[in-house]
Image: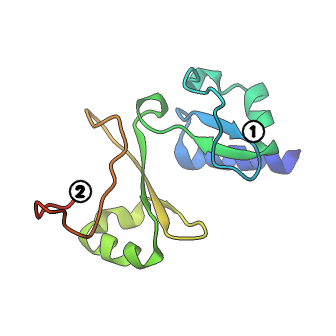
Amino acid sequence: MEKANEIVAELKELLGELVVFIGWPRGVKGTRRKWKHLRPEDMTPAYLSKLPRGNIGVALGEVSGGLCAIDLDSEELVQPFLAVNAHLSETLQTHGSRGCVFWIRLIGKYPDHTFKLSTVPRKSGQFL
């Protein structure tokens, strides 16, 4: 169990103390399990000790102190993205089976929902 506690400690070090972690069953990214009631103060040693039994999710947005993620689903997009966002080359990046996630903390007001961005213009000629 010591190795499991090290994983949670490393995540807290990388993402900060004000982060809400969510326990998911092993092998899935999420379930219908209720978690939106969780707050940083709920991240007690007892709660955190149960996390490594499965996957560990991270709540984004205001509940985690403005923590947000920019998820690029293809490795080919990473370098072009960094070419126009060079300041993000020094932020925390995680790499999975495809692409990359850039972890950032936003300050001030920002949208409270997900945006899908595209490199292909929509009919209006704008990118989203």
Residue 62 at x, y = what percent?
41, 30
Q: Is residue 15 visible?
A: yes
Q: Residues within 10 Å of mark 1 (few under 14, many from 20)?
A: many
Residue 111, relative to residue 68: is it above or below?
Answer: above
Q: Residue furthest front?
A: 123
| Residue 7 as seen in the image, left or right of residue 66 | right
Residue 79 at x, y = what percent?
37, 77
Q: Please, what is the three-letter code of the amino acid marked with disc 2? A: Leu
- Label annotation for residue 128: 2
Q: Is residue 5 visible?
A: no
| Residue 75 as seen in the image, left or right of residue 79 | right
| Residue 82 as seen in the image, left or right of residue 99 | left
Q: Provide the secondary structure element on which disc 2 rests.
A: loop
Q: Please, what is the three-letter code of the amino acid marked with disc 1? A: Leu
Residue 98 at x, y = what percent?
54, 71
| Residue 91 as seen in the image, left or right of residue 126 | right
Q: Residues within 10 Å of mark 2 (few under 14, many from 20)?
A: few
Q: Residue furthest left?
A: 124
Residue 58 at x, y = what percent?
57, 42
Quickly name the residue at label 1.
51
Quarter of the figure with the C terminus: bottom left
Residue 65, relative to residue 2: is it above or below?
Answer: above
- Label annotation for residue 65: none
In the image, what residue occupies the spot 49% across and 66% down?
100
